[in-house]
Each structure stands twice: as C-alpha cells, then as structure tokens.
Image (cartoon, grey):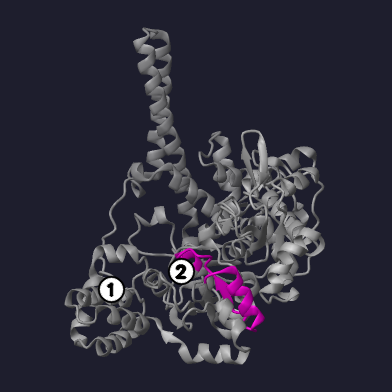
Amino acid sequence: MPFTYLYAMIDRPTIERILDAAQIVDVVQEFVPLKKRGVNYLGLCPFHNEKTPSFTVSPTKEIFKCFGCGKVGNSVNFIMEHEHLTYPEALKYLARKYHIEVVEKELTPEETEKQNERESLLVLSAYAARQFTENLFQSDEGMNVGLSYFKERGFRQATLKKFEIGYSFERRDAFTKKALEDGYKQDYLVKTGLSIQHEDRVFDRFSGRVMFPIHSLSGQVLGFGGRVLRTDAKTAKYLNSPESEIYHKSRIVYGIFQARKTITQEDKCFLVEGYTDVMSLHEAGIENVVASSGTSLTQEQVRLIKRFTPNITILYDGDAAGIKASVRGIDIVLEEGMNVKIVLLPDGEDPDSYSKKVSIDEFNKYIKGHETDFIKFKTALLMDEAAGDPVKKANLIRDIVRSIAVIPETISRTVYIKECATQMGIQEAILYSEVNKMRQQKSFQDRNRFPEPQDLPIPPIQLQKQVLPSAVNSAATEREIIRLLMKYGSTEFERHISKEDGLEVVITVSDYIVSEIISDDLHFDDEAYAHIFEEYRFAMDSGTFIEDKGFVKHPDPAISRMAADLLSEPHSLSKIYSQKQTYVETEEMKLKEIVPDVILMFKSGKIKVRIKEIQNQIKTAQEAKDIDKAMELMKKSQALSAALKMLSKKLGDRIIL
Ligand SMILES: [Zn+2]
C-alpha cells in the first residue's frame, strides 16, 4: 500500500470501534441543537454566522454538511473542527464519550521519532505546567515568592489550583535543565518557547515569574503567560509564550476551559483583560468569564465564544486610557451578530481590585445595574467628546454608522438606528440612508463575508453551456469515478450467464470500473483517489467488498472528509453527464450509461496526455536527427490516435469528443 497512517498511536481496531460507535446526530447534537427534517436533521451552522439553518446532518450517510459554508465530514471531522482537536485527540474524545477503551500501540523507537510534533509539544507543555505548580506549592522559593504574592492579593488556593497556577524559578536555566534531565528534547523546549536558545546556551524564558497556563477548550496546556514579581526587573511585566505549532494567540481566549460550562448555563460571557481578572471573578462566583490577554479581539476568538453564547459583556476599567481605541475593535464582535454590552467599572478600579473591594452581592448588583448596550455606550462616549464640534460630530456619526452597518440582523439594525438617532439628535432617515450606503459598498461586502440574502445581488440565470470534454479536466473525471465507486460500488451493473457453469453472474459497478481500468493499466494522477481505487481493486481481488459508506469511516481524516463531500453532493445526476441531458432521470436509473461514459472519458483523457508526451518526444528525436526513433514514436502516436477515435465513436453522439 502506498499509504501510511500518520497516526499510529491508536491501533486500527480501536479506531474502527470508535467510528462504529459514534452516531453523527448524537455527536453533533451535543453542540448544535438539531431539528428533524425528513430523513435528515437541520440546525444553525456552528462554523459560520447564519440565521436560517443550512447545516444538515444525515444519520443514514453518517455525515454533516453545511450548505452555507461548505464544511463537511463525519463525526470525527466534526469534533476536530468544532473542538479544534487533532485527529487522535478527536478520536480520544469520542472514545471517552462512548466509553471505549483506547488501546495505544507500543511505539517503536522509529515511530517515537516520527511521532507527531504537535503531540510532543503538548506533552511537554503539560509537563511544564506540572513542574511549575510543584515549584509554587512545594518549594521554598515558590512559596516565599510566588505563593505569598497570590496570598497577599487574596487568592484562595482552590482558585490557584483550578487555573493550574505555577512558578518558574529565578535561576536562569532551572526549568530547562530539569526538563532535559527528564528526557525532553531541547528542540521541543525551544519550539514551545519555554526555553530560549542563544548560541550554544539554552535558558528559561520565564525565570522568576508566576505562571498562568493557557488552556485549550478541552483543557490541554497550549502556552503560558508569566508575570514577573521583582519590582526592579528590567523586563516586561507580562510575558507570553511565542506562537508555536500548538499556541496561536489569536485563536484562544484565556479561561475558556474553566468557563465554557457556565457560559452555556448563563448564556452569557464576560470579557476582561487580564489573567488575574478572570481568577478574581471566579473567586467572586462569576465563572463565565474569559480574557483576551491584552490583545484586541480577533474574529476567531469571537467565534470561539459564540459557540457557547451570543451574549458578551465587556468589563472595562474605569480609567482605561485606551478605552476609545478598544471600543473601535468591538465592531468585530458586532459583525458576528453577537449582542455586546459594556460595563464601565468605577474610576480607578479593574475587575480584580473591584471584586475584592466589595462583596460578591454588591459586585453582581453593580454589573447588573451598569450593563449598557454597546452602541449606546459608544454613542454616549463619542458624543461627550464631540460636544460643540461639528467636524468631530460628523466623524462620530460615520463611526456609529459603521458599527450599526456591520450588524448582520436587519431588525437589530433598525432598533439601533432609532435609538441612536434620538441619542445623537439627528433624523432617523439620515442614519438609515448612511447605513444602507455603507452596506452597499463593495469593500464593505467583501469584508463581511456572509451578507444577508436580501443584500445579495440576484445572479443572472445562467444557461448551461455545452462543455466540451476537452475542457473537462482529468481531475474531475477521476473524482467522478471515485464518487460512482463510493455511491454505487455494490449496486448491480449488469448480469450475464457464465459460459463455464451456466450460473448467473452479477457484475457490480465497482467490478466493472475496476476491471475496465486495470485492463488498460491506467492510473489515477491524484494520490488520494489512487489510494481509494487501490482499496476497491484489493477488495475485488480478494473477493471481499467495500460497504458503500465505508470510506466515510476511513481512518484517514482526509479520506473520510473527501468521502463525506462526495456523498453529500445534492445533484441527482452525475455532474459530467448532466451536461448533455435534456431531461432529468435519477442517476441510479442511468448507471448503465453514466458509468461506461465516465470510464471512456477517463481513458480518452489519459490517451490524450500520452499522445502529447509522445509528440514532444518526436520533436526531440527529430532535433537529434534520430529518424528511427522518430518513426517508431510516430507509429505509437498513430495507434493511440486510432484508439482515441474508437473511444470517441463509442461515446458516439452522446458526447462530442
Ligand atoms: Zn456553515
């Protein structure tokens, strides 16, 4: 087999058991509410912003497909995509869900060498987090410096443990040395950013800092934030892990692992700025809170939160200097159709200090009493600033118009226009026309990738053009053959009476396709298609068969996703074949024509490529004055041309070659 399994850690029988157990509806429903529609289930796509459900789950095909954004796959693909997990991680997730024991294969030294780098980085990060907590709670230095700092600030041990807070020793190579001793590779230490290499010296990035591990949704340690405690330090107060294979700052928010359950329960997420703000709110009993870690929010971060709730409340420090700058960044949250509210804390207070200053009840009361809708907040803020300055006021209107324009829902936009018009003392009609103008700008629509249907220009109806087969590239034909194999492989193609024993022989679609292709010794260009074809060929040779849905459960995620894609095509008739159809019948009724046609197209495509190659060789031979060689090649070329002509004739007037 030309194919290697990248993920050799979980053995194949276990993978198969997991794939068999995972029910797609069951798996998806944990994250997306689904409604039954006929044989399928329908819901709002978790991967893009939509109001009308186009996310379809087919229990019979065991796949999901979004007709809005095109995401498609089986249960494992869904978990990978939705939970940001790798393939083995997603398998382990499903194994836990269905109580399947995961048998991990003993790795040979060679396999260990090859073991997925990402996995190694995750293992190392988990180890580092353990080391740092041990330092904090069990070493003299950790307790004297780190733990006392947190105690002074009023944090309980339970909260520190919940967030896996740790401490990195002052000595510049303490952690690096320990990790190397424990068998971790220097290469990975540098790649996770835990260590820094300078010429031949390797030392700790985070020495003398208290450590905040940054967890993934499923609780894996992806990276760290470290805060320096010495007041004389000539270094940044906070330091973060650099971007790595596992840590992408823009894709994660701090605290999401600890907050996800409560965010769903409360249907609301608080957003704060720092790590200790998150921890303080947990202490105050508010657990639905995450931090953007100082950076302005990215679309990916907003979508991460949106999976759990559409309601976000941002807590601002009362005296934050950059408040106006950060207010501008919030349009990205509005664009995702989220409801954004703002709470401005009393002057001089941040969530950490204020939650400690007042009782939990008072704190909660303050938040409830001061939650302001974002656009109202922004309008008021900018109005204050623009008071008595017409130029500033014009800019302000443009600014507010932009915030309103990005909101995807028409109804919300209308409500905002009414409110802001009153607030700013201008006519509603003016705001309306400004918002509509902005929404019609092409640059605006390009930026906002999923405009509402009513905003989309209606495409002119296109008449199906006659596509000449020469334009049908070989990749499309290869894909079509694989699709037919997957969809109808075990369907009867024809039957005849055997001359040897007089018994009736049933030829399936896959029997026909495989024997046609191997009899001419033809090959697929596409590696994945070639692999799938080889599996059908092997099944035929060995007298076994492949279930029609077999590839949806293929252990290779790329192949299972492709299979889901091929099988989910809504077209009732083969794409290539429909070009010459004047009326529509079901594809299955036409298999006897479609299958041979596609094979003929595949063959003629291959022959054309071969003829071209030979013609080039003839040229080279002629230039080299090798007359014999040129003659021989010309004969070959003529034979192939004749074969091509014959194929064309077979295709007859059904397809013009
Ligand atoms: Zn979608």
> Residue 31 location, x and y as percent?
59, 75
Q: Does the beta carbon at disc 2 come under 8 Å from ligand 1?
A: yes
Residue 570 appears in view = no
**Could you say whether the residue bearing mark 1 is in a helix, strand or loop?**
helix
Question: What numbered label is drawn on residue 383?
Answer: none
> Residue 406 location, x and y as percent?
33, 73
Badge 1: residue crowd in 10 Å (few <14, some 14–19, many ≥20): some
In front: 545, or 309? 309
> Residue 80 location, x and y as percent?
60, 61
Residue 512 appears in view = yes
Residue 622 drawn above or below residue 234: above
In front: 657, or 460? 460
Residue drawn at x 45%, y 68% is 67
Residue drawn at x 20%, y 86% is 426
Residue 60, by quadrant, is bottom right
> Residue 524 location, x and y as percent?
52, 40
Magenta part of the chain: 273-301
Give the residue number, with chain letter if any, for mark 2: 48
Badge 2: residue crowd in 10 Å (few <14, some 14–19, many ≥20): some
Residue drawn at x 43%, y 12% is 629
Question: What numbered label is drawn on residue 399?
Answer: 1
